[in-house]
Image: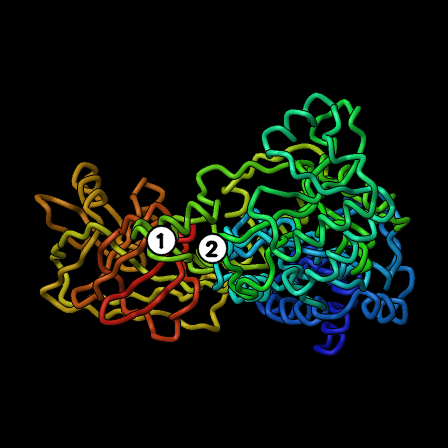
Amino acid sequence: MSDNDLEATVRKYALQNAVLYSGKANPKAVQGKVLAEAPELRSRVKEVLPLIASVVESVNDMPIAEQQRELEAIDASLLRREKGERRTGLPALPGMERGKVVMRFAPGPSGPLHLGHTRVAVLNDEYCRTFDGTFINRIEDTNPERIDPAAYDMIPEDLEWLGVKVHRTVVQSDRFELYYDIARQLIELGRAYVCTCPAEEWRALKEKGVPCPHREEDASTAMEKFERMLAGQYGEEEAIFVVKTDLAHPNPAIRDFVGLRIVTSTPHPLKGSRYCVYPMMNFSVAVDDHLLGLTHVLRGKDHLNNTLRQEYIFNYLGWKRPHYTHYGLVHVPDAILKTSTVGKGIKAGEYAGWDDVRLGTVRALAKRGFRPEAIRRFWVDCGVKETDIEFSWDNLYAYNKDMVDGTANRYFFVWDPVPLEVHGAEELRARAPRHPDHPERGNREFRLTAPITLYVVRKDLEAAMEAGRVRLKDLGNVEVRDGKAFYQGNDLSVLKEGYRIIHWVPTGSVPASVVMPTGESRDGLVENVPKEEEGNVVQFERFGFARVERTAPKLLAYFAH
């Protein structure tokens, strides 16, 4: 098969895999198809893999409609899914039409995004990409008490890192006058009122299903009181705007709900004290979902009651409701996600910042070397099922390993190092590949001359002394007696005899510190790592994957998994 034919074959199957699976081809699936068609390439698979990776990346950058057109021109039969082929990706939601889908992500600016946010952001983005839709990033900043001004910049940065394509950004604090206009319409329709009862009294009446004295006031009276709210003639908790529902509803949470409240004690970071009447979430969300033309709302089932509340506003005003889909909740163990908790911890000096590796923020994950593509594939494969999910870090690690394994060069890192003298050789040479699957990247070369002193992990040396023999990876076999090593040649057949393999670093290696997800550090020595690796994920052999922050004068890296 010629090079041109090979590239055409790879592209054909990359397009097919992308079209059948939500616009994103999987390199391993493409590899399987290519090798099935051209089995003679199996002996050259290491040469073929870079081409597959390049073509897949190119195809995945295309809109799915363009992928479909190109594949149809090549071979229309490839558009059909083979019988028994497992479906991945997201199922189409009711009412989805290509080019007409509008969905949103609606974070509150209390801090940067965390792992929980990535689920809803990725899923909405995936649907918009699949159906050539519009993705809206709506900053819901109507609670001034919980706003971190820096979040207005951090959220878009995190979305960009995730690869989410934002078509429009909307900030709710820019839309207060729109909310006021809708509130007036509801008053005129007799569907809302202004209550000036003490807050506890109103809540107690609602709980009993009893109307407060202001519920049946005429529209002109309610409107007058609302305008007084806007004019700042009431203090906090002295008046609320209430949307009427069904006071006899079996669920007290659905009965009359607060649509707007008064806030005067906390200036808004963007608007200052310009406004004193703030919309509540259920009110602003319903209004914006309509005015922004949302066709589908995708969110957790913890919002079921919110959906029921918001539907009242849609029904009162004769608006077409979006299609609502509520997926199961996810429990993320061993992760600190709550931004208010993290923010307090940062101020108190408990955390170094939003990217502290102990946290579950997007910034912390990026710092550790997670790839956004891994996070995306993880959530897409989890889907939008109604059942709750127990998040598994091990599963996410596996996804990320698939992404970084092929690019991560290998190096020796020795933590808790102790010296080991090697006797019986005037000179030893070692050649270790930068990557076992990519010989084109070359080797790490080592030349050691007597007197030879290496550094190994303390526990490895203790085990070697107990066993009496060990193989130094890529260097040779030694017997270990009294804390010293005696060279026994480089015959690999000894591995069949049970020789344990340990890694090592030579004298003159670089001090290194690897920060673990717990915040603790593993200190030791590392072979010379090129400066070009800064920012990259590498694999420290027998230790794990880590992202290199800096290489000199002391290497600093953050452990991924």
Tell me where residue 110 appears, x and y as whole percent.
Answer: 51, 54
The kind of residue tagged 2 is Leu
Left/right of residue 397 with respect to residue 347 in the rendered view: right
Tell me where residue 53 appears, x and y as whole percent.
Answer: 63, 67
- Residue 492 is marked as none
Q: Which residue is mark 1?
A: 346
The kind of residue tagged 1 is Ile
At x 29% / y 43%, what residue is drawn?
499
Please say whether residue 191 is visible from this viewpoint.
Answer: yes
At x 69% / y 36%, what residue is drawn?
301
Residue 428 versus residue 276 in the image, above or below: below
Left/right of residue 479 with respect to residue 337 in the rendered view: left
On the image, which quarter does residue 211 sit in? top right
Tell me where residue 391 appears, x and y as whole percent.
Answer: 55, 39
Q: Secondary structure at mark 1?
A: helix
- Decide which of 302, 291 is in the foreground and name it: 291
For marks 2 and 1 on the same chain, the one whose residue lies earlier in the sequence: 1
- Decide which of 236, 295 is in the foreground and name it: 236
Q: Give yes or no for contact between labels 2 and 1 (Cβ–Cβ under 8 Å).
A: no
Residue 12 versus residue 368 in the image, above or below: below
Q: Secondary structure at mark 2?
A: helix
Please say whether residue 39 is visible from this viewpoint.
Answer: no
At x 77% / y 73%, what residue is drawn?
8
Q: Nearer the viewer, mark 2 or mark 1?
A: 1
Tell me where residue 49 appears, x and y as whole percent.
Answer: 61, 66
Q: Which residue is mark 2?
A: 365
